[in-house]
Amino acid sequence: MSPGGPPRVMGHSIERVRVKRTSLMVLGGLAAGYWMRTHPSACPYSLRFVLRFPRRALARERLLEILAPEPGERVLELGPGTGYYTLGVAAALDGGTLDIFDISQEFLDDLVRKARDQGIDNITPTQGDARALPYGDDTFDAAYLVAVLGEIPDEDAALRELARVLRPGGRLVVGESLASGDPHAVLFGKLRSRGEHAGFTLEDRQGGPLAYFARFRIP
Ligand SMILES: C[S@@+](CC[C@H](N)C(=O)[O-])C[C@H]1O[C@@H](n2cnc3c(N)ncnc32)[C@H](O)[C@@H]1O
């Protein structure tokens, strides 16, 4: 303790130094978050551990409920990453096919290996960019993407492509969670207007505006 007062660092009280340091950290965090929200980029394979955290609002059962995959359907998953949802959906498609499409070949290779180990053989991987899907018009009965849309530099282009490759009456489920700290999460209001602009009709939403699954349909 300095003589006659509280402890000091280079003339400043320790309390003041702490407040300054905390403020700088908060400002730094906000600036980084803002930068990430305004500069969409794909989640790198090296950060795959973050995809293993448990998810309450975006639980697997909730996705299955709102997507309602039917045996024999052909479904597209955009940006499966480590496959948090993939194997459960593939299993529900009994006799159908799940196409997985990701910009990262490493994620796809891992996931195909995992599926093979579990005896799941109805998954077809394709690498590419969601802004230009390499599938014909009206190919899929349903499509879904979770924590992906906000990473794509042109969300409208990706939604237009999804509308194109879904058959009339096909459904699209989008999952997003700002509540989990995902800096690229798309807020519900924004998704709704972008989806409608791309030709979808909003049908249902599970969860709140900060963590939700939304289901759209091609009229
Ligand atoms: C945050 S991860 C989410 C993974 C998974 N959906 C989940 O919920 O665990 C985003 C995924 O989208 C993929 N991705 C990002 N941008 C993409 C793009 N433009 N085209 C295709 N995939 C993309 C990433 O490679 C990654 O696998």
Image: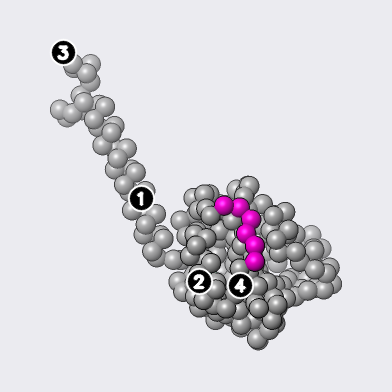
Q: What element carries label 1?
A: helix
Point out residue 176 in the picture as x, y percentages from the top left corner: 56, 58
How far apart are the alpha carbons under marks 2 and 1? 26 Å
Q: What element carries label 3?
A: loop
Point out residue 59 in the picture as x, y percentages from the top left corner: 67, 52
How far apart are the alpha carbons under marks 4 and 3? 71 Å
Q: Which badge, 2 or 1, comes first in the chain's sequence?
A: 1
Ligand 1: does it lie within 8 Å of the C-beta at label 4?
A: no
Query: In this rendering, which labeled residue sits more in front, label 3 or label 1?
Result: 1
Q: Name the residue under label 4.
A: 201
Q: Mark 2 points at which residue?
A: 194
Where on the picture, by quarter, is residue 25? top left
Which residues fall within the magenta stretch? 203-208
Q: Name the residue under label 3.
A: 4
Nearest to the observer: residue 11 or residue 209: 209
Q: In which quarter of the image is the C terminus?
A: bottom right
Q: Which badge, 2 or 3, comes first in the chain's sequence?
A: 3
Query: In this rendering, which labeled residue sits more in front, label 2 or label 3?
Result: 2
Query: In this rendering, which labeled residue sits more in front, label 2 or label 4?
Result: 4
Q: Determine if residue 80 is in view.
A: no
